[in-house]
Image: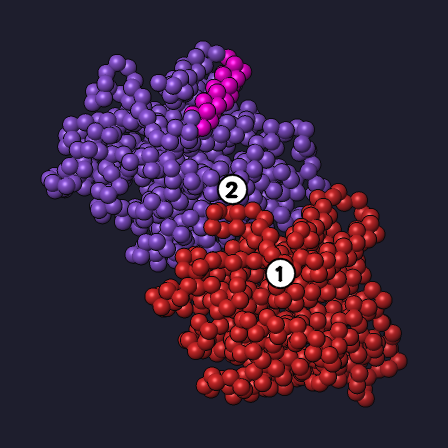
Chain colours: A purple, B red
Amino acid sequence: MDFVQNFPFFSIILSMFSGIISSVLPKRAAKWVNTVMIILVGIFSFILLFYMIGRGNSYTYMMGHFPAPWGNEIRVGVLEAGMALFFCIIMILSLFGGRKKLDEELEESKHSLYYILADLMLSSLLALVYTNDLFTAYVFVEINTIAACGLIMIRRNGRTIEAAVRYMIMSLLGSGMLLMGICMLYDLTGHLLMSNIHEQVSALAVSGEYHVPLLVTIALMSVGLAIKSALFPFHAWLPDAYGYSTVSSAAILSSLVSKGYIFLLIKIIYRVIGIDVFDGSRIIDMLFAFGLMGMIFGSLSAIKENDVRRMIAYSSVAQIGYIYMGIGMGTQAGMEASVFHILTHAATKSLLFIAAIGLTDVSGGSRKFIDLTGAAYRNRWAGVAFAVGSLSMVGVPLFSGFISKLLFAQAAVQNHVKMLPALIVLGISTVLNAIYFMKTVIRIYTPVEGTGSGEGVTFKNMKIYVVTLVCFIILNVFLGVSSQPVVNLIGQGLAMFS
Amino acid sequence: MQYMILSVFFPVLAGVYLLIKKERGNRKYLLVSTGAFLVITAILVVLALCLGREGMFTLFSLTERLPILFKIDEISVVFSVLAVLIFLCAGFFSFEYMKQEKWEKKYYGFYLIILGVLLALCFAGNLITFYLFFELLTLSSFPLVLHERSKEAVMSGLKYLFYSLCGAYMALFGLYFVERYGNTLTFSAGGVISDQAVSNHMGVLLLVAFLMIMGFSVKAGMFPMHAWLPSAHPVAPAPASAVLSAVIVKAGVLAIVRVVYFVFGASFLRGSWVQTVWLTLSLFTVFMGSLLAYREPVLKKRLAYSTVSQISYILFGLAVMEREAFTGSMLHVLAHGLIKAALFLCAGAIIFKTGKTRVEELRGIGKEMPVLMICYTFVSLGLIGIPPTGGFISKWYLAKGALTSAIPVFYWLGPVILLVSALLTAGYLLPVTIQGFFPGEDYDYGALQKKEPSFFMIFPVLILTILSVVIGLLPEGVIGYLSQIIEKIV
């Protein structure tokens, strides 16, 4: 066994233990531990990704001393390693981008707590990505929920507590359904490891036994994870949670937490249920339909919104709709498009959140559109970043959003039944996206009398913020211009799943 | 080869440089650098057209099957020469006109970027490259519409953006299918759709072709997606309106030429329902645009409606899909570009000197600005189609092409509507001249002041007028040049 194969295990343990150690460390130290840990995990994932590309097939890693059907396992392929790397990049950029705001908004005693939660969040995300055991996945789903609640209400005011309670209720409903699904699967198959369940499920599907329970199981797990990742119509918790929490939390929640669940769902589809059985069930059409509805209603809500943070949050509902639409197409191409959109959306949405905070800060802290007039002249970098993020979301070529839409459309053209609804809704939602994002961009670039350029906001006093924005923009353009290698990797990774 | 890409990048980079440069209130520096950038771009384009004709140039690949690719053919030459000419003239005009406007630096910055994007559109070698720059054209021309930042400007700008994005999406919809059913995405004379796909998926492909034509014709202002044009063009500063109306709408025409003759192929669409619907819509737009222009009291808006009508002349010629009609369309692209730019610059000069915008206020304007108004009269005659100006030749070919085609009903209906619309054109353009030079007995000659605009304003208008007449006198060169490619594609 190569030493590199230990890296996933190291990553999970490292992030979890840095959370534990941080609880006794002072604020500054906790911050450093967190930063160093994320960078280390990122490097691990990077090396692992190259190792996996060279290796060409996936491997399983035994946790502890018990072999397969009883023990716990980690499974690594190209897609897992790539996702882990991507999550690390987004996490560290989100934390850097919101650090200044974090220092202002948080009580002194809460700082180290915040980093503990961030550490736990990363460890649970990594575990969701790597695990080969359904029950372990459930445990880390719960850890993830708790960490997410903490991240939402760490900035204590009425709105965030309400948002956190809402999130908690919806999220627990989702995990409850997931747990019920896992229990039923255990009853049906007698296994908890993904590969073993998969064998049994295939056998059940062939023999036709337990048809209804299997269908119910698939439905429970899909809906549970859909609630947790805010698929329309289960998105009621989302705008408050993303809209009022501190900006790093909003960026992490929107681009990582919901994506972790979606990734888990994709894993379940491929590794537990099996893509054929899943395609054969009606659940896939339901996901497709809800995805389409989310694309339209999320955008409509975003158009009506008068608060820029909540607008961006509602836009997430629409974007998650895109991802579920891709999953719902039930083809390899659709799934590739969805995974690519996970990357696109994560890179763009966190950019938008962090750019928006720069704009609201120079507008007297107000998030109303009317007060944002001309904000792009007061903070030029945030203005440019917001414009780039918006163009990417609208789907202008050269940015990552265009490639996503291209992949979705190419996938749709291959599926004769779902082609027409997918393309029509894709068109409508593109136009709706254009309405609210361009409206905002025009608003922030409309000059108002009596404001100089860049008052008080210079490169010097917000170096980290600007560098973060630039990194995000580069990431976006990279995904938009040289998408082919990334898409190839995703295809390779999905092939390794089965 | 490299000249081609240089002529695209240079104006874009120059524009970005102007935009990010700190404003120091040094107007002269701004004007000199803008002028220099425009001239250098023109030289680069000429070099590209002379030296870069062979082969293709791949910039990079968006995905494996979608390269960003440039190549030059006869169609690119026509459109790029027109773009550069009008940008030079309108740019020269702006040096004087933009004195009264705010945010000048921004204006010149975007002006140069648009030129670069337009050139990229002319040189685009495949559909995805074309789509990319088509979107960028919408986004980069958007600030010109918004320039005044008034409520009206913002609303028109949003309307423009909304229509254009809708249109571009309809076109993108087609791109997915062309990628699936075409042999290649690269433009090639006569079409790229494989024969097998044509026989198996006739219905879908016709629908796709229709959607692409409709989508791209939003930019060209064809009914029913024309409403943005009369509101967006006049709110921009006059030289920007000239560029928008004379060149940027031509991007829609170029798109349709590429889609119909270089992707689907004329033989595929000839005789289909797509052709019938397209002919109907374009003829209707010709008539409706003229009628609306006739009723419009504000001069710049009247000219914008006139653009709606005149561009549909071009689209009608393209829809006929015969050699002579195609020749007529290409000639009208040139003639209309030169004439409409001159008309908008005249309107701009009048606004700059007198502040008058409505047609009925312009009594006696010919006495105040004789040279300008003589130019206006000449180009108006051109647009109406009176020999020996450019408009006559192009309309002659359009009508002749329609008459010799074998399309039922349209072979006679087309020329009739073109004639009626020409009458209406006379009706909406000439009153300005008549009232201007012959204000009537009760006109107070005592209060008459000479208000002739300065050299900076007159010169571009003169050049454009002369060119539009020259095209009418010596069309042989253009026709001969175009015939090589027309042989291949129609």
The residue stretch that appears in magenta: A26-50
Classed neighbour count for the residue bearing mark 1: other residues with Cα under 10 Å, few (<14), some (14–19), many (≥20): many
Do the dots labelled 2 and 1 sit on one chain?
A: no
Query: What secondary structure predominates along the stretch shown in magenta?
Result: helix
Three-letter residue code for mark 2: Ser
Give me the C-alpha separation between circle 2 and circle 1. 25 Å
User: Which residue is more in the foreground, B40 or A387?
Assistant: B40
Residue beneath disc 1 = B72
Given the image, what chain letter belongs to the residue carrying mark 2?
Answer: A
x and y, in percent, of residue B245 in the image: 65, 67
Given the image, what chain letter belongs to the residue carrying mark 1?
Answer: B
Membership of A31 in magenta stretch: yes
Element type at mark 2:
loop
When asked about the image quadrant of residue B476, the answer is bottom right
Report the side of B466 relative to B158 (left or right).
right
Numbered circle sitting on residue A482: 2
x and y, in percent, of residue B139 in the image: 59, 54
Numbered circle sitting on residue B441: none
Three-letter residue code for mark 1: Ile
Report the side of A139 relative to B141 (left or right).
left
Classed neighbour count for the residue bearing mark 2: other residues with Cα under 10 Å, few (<14), some (14–19), many (≥20): some
The image shows residue A264, relative to residue A319, as above or below, that is: above
x and y, in percent, of residue A145 in the image: 35, 28
Of badges 2 and 1, nearer the viewer stands 1
Whether pointer 2 and pointer 1 mark residues with C-beta atoms closer than 8 Å, the reply is no
Q: Determine the residue positioned at 79% across, 85% down.
A: B438
Element type at mark 1:
loop
User: Which residue is more in the foreground, B464 or A151?
Assistant: B464
